Amino acid sequence: MGLFDRVVLTLYTFFLALFSLTMLCVSLGWSYPLALLGTSLGTVSGRWATGLVSLVLFSASLRLLYAGFRRRRGSQSVVHETPMGDVRISLDAVEDLVKRVGRQVSGVRDVKARVASGSAGLRVLVRLTASPDISIPQMSDELQTTVKNYVKNVVGVGVSEVQVHVDTITAESRRSRVE
């Protein structure tokens, strides 16, 4: 679920909670919300405002239903053709492979990977946390070469590009220690 869908879900949940609380108060005898609704629906501008709010909430409902039922990216795969038939490897599996290989490169602390399939081969985006005591250009060259060769050897599909983004440089390891 993307950022936009999360914002819509948050606002939708807030309005639904407010509406539910108001209906609970009405059921306990508070008649002011019903009188206010009757008054506002008696005017043209009140009907327009009620219709607009209803349209926005209905649109949010449809958007959230769509976000809940759309196909996930995990179903995408890479096809490697062999004499015995096709081998399908999910892009999530390739991402896991890239993360594992990336952690083995000296100076890399934490790795996040995204893999997309393109016409010239796989496109890999690696986001990482680097150690401060290494040369980032050398480390990124080594990482790009290692990822490209390892994915080609293991998956059997060429890598057209490996982009490296260094998000942070830190001396701290994200792994917890047991004392």
Image (cartoon, rainbow, N blue to C red):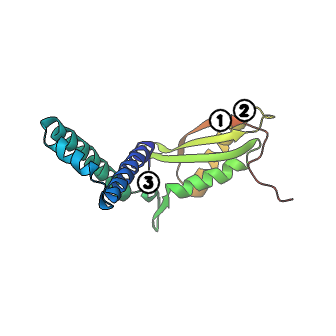
Residue indicated by mark 1: 166
Q: Are marks 1 and 3 in contact (CB under 8 Å)?
A: no
Q: Locate residue 105 relative to residue 63 in the image: left or right.
A: right
Where does the image place residue 118, in percent across and percent down from the top left?
Answer: 44, 44
Q: Locate residue 52 relative to residue 25 in the image: left or right.
A: left
Where does the image place residue 163, in percent across and percent down from the top left?
Answer: 58, 37
Q: Identify which amino acid the numbered label 2 is placed on.
A: Ile
Q: Identify which amino acid the numbered label 3 is placed on.
A: Arg
Residue indicated by mark 3: 73
Residue indicated by mark 2: 136
Is residue 131 in view?
A: yes
The residue at 81%/34% (across/down) is 133
> CA gap, disc 2 to disc 3?
31 Å
Where does the image place residue 94, in percent across and percent down from the top left?
Answer: 56, 54
> CA gap, disc 1 to disc 3?
24 Å
Front residue (pair 112, 17): 17
Q: Locate residue 112 relative to residue 66 in the image: left or right.
A: right
Q: Residue lying farthest right?
A: 179
Front residue (pair 14, 61): 14
Q: Secondary structure at mark 2?
A: helix
> CA gap, disc 2 to disc 1?
9 Å
Q: Locate residue 27 relative to residue 153 in the image: left or right.
A: left
Instruction: Determine the image quadrant of residue 41.
Output: top left
Q: Secondary structure at mark 1?
A: strand
